[in-house]
Image (cartoon, grey):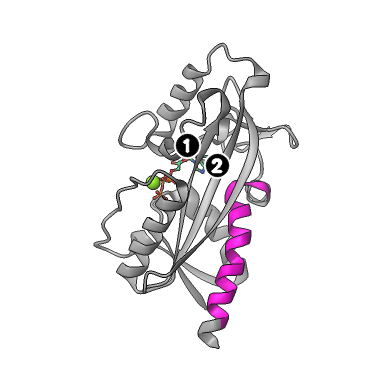
Amino acid sequence: MLKLVLATNNKGKVKELAAMLQPLGFQVVPIGSYPGFQEVEEDGETFQANAIKKAVAAAEFTGELSLADDSGLEVDALAGAPGVHSARFAGEPTDDAANNRKLLALLEGVPAEKRTARFRCVIAIAEPSGNNQTADGTCEGIILREQKGEGGFGYDPLFYVPEYRQTFAELASAKKNAISHRGRALGKALEILNRLYANREG
Ligand SMILES: O=P(O)(O)OP(=O)(O)OP(=O)(O)OC[C@H]1O[C@@H](n2cnc3c(O)ncnc32)[C@H](O)[C@@H]1O
Ligand SMILES: [Mg+2]
């Protein structure tokens, strides 16, 4: 089995990443199952910087190949906010419902054609040595005026994908994974993982 530590405390991310990686033969282990791991401070100015920081910390702590995901929502009418601050948009600790309420309040009165947004994701893969590589993905959508759907997590009930006429929270999870920022970043990250494992078994 190809062991891979998932350096995230977000259950929604773990679920999606595991659903995509397990069928490919990866044995994924969430960082939560390693007692004593100190959560890293996500003080980077970019998704890439934060993803690398999380992946390297996990790889150094566990001695295993580790994957981290830093992601967020960029809303054009808000000049790209909440961006890297998506998780704590409405303050600490992370509260998805409060984040969604804040987003709706800030967009009140903004017409549909100006509610464009995108999710961004950077996945970092780190080795215990600290060596790391990254891959990114985006997905374009529109911020609705009210939440729709029960699936997913975070901003999913407000993120409408015109192509499918559904929000990320309404889409079946396999469909979300096929088109999401995370799914696209993971597709590229798999090429990195394949090279790393090929070298190991070399
Ligand atoms: O840092 P980790 O432990 O991975 O977990 P986190 O939830 O803090 O994750 P981030 O720092 O990457 O913050 C990303 C936030 O952006 C939002 N987000 C990212 N991907 C999303 C998705 O697929 N659907 C909905 N919201 C998403 C969600 O609110 C996340 O909390
Ligand atoms: Mg975080």
Q: Position of residue 97 (x, y in %)?
A: 43, 29
- Residue 152's tag is 2
Q: Is residue 187 above or below residue 111?
A: below
Residue lying farthest top?
A: 109
- Residue 67's tag is none
Counting other residues with Cα less than 10 Å from the Cα at mark 2, is it few (<14), some (14-19), or many (20 or more)? many
Counting other residues with Cα less than 10 Å from the Cα at mark 1, is it few (<14), some (14-19), or many (20 or more)? many
The secondary structure type at the circle numbered 2 is loop
Q: Position of residue 35 (x, y in %)?
A: 27, 63
Residue lying farthest right?
A: 163
The secondary structure type at the circle numbered 1 is helix
Q: Position of residue 159 (x, y in %)?
A: 60, 32
Would you identify the image quadrant in which residue 54 lies?
Answer: bottom left
Q: Is mark 2 within 8 Å of ligand 1?
A: yes
Q: Nearer the viewer, residue 63 or 95?
A: 63
Q: Marks 2 and 1: which is nearer the front?
A: 1
Q: Position of residue 67 (x, y in %)?
A: 46, 62
Q: Is mark 1 within 8 Å of ligand 1?
A: no
Q: Earlier in the sequence, mark 2 or mark 1?
A: 1
Could you tell me which residue is drawn at 61 percent across and 45 percent down?
138
- Residue 83's tag is 1
Q: Nearer the viewer, residue 122 or 149?
A: 122
Q: Which residues are magenta?
A: 179-198
Q: Amino acid at mark 2?
A: Gly
Horizontal placement of 87 versus 152: left or right?
left
Would you identify the image quadrant in which residue 31 lies?
Answer: bottom left
Residue lying farthest bottom?
A: 202
The prevailing secondary structure element of the residues shown in magenta is: helix
Q: Nearer the viewer, residue 46 or 95?
A: 46
Gap between marks 2 and 1 measured at Cα: 19 Å
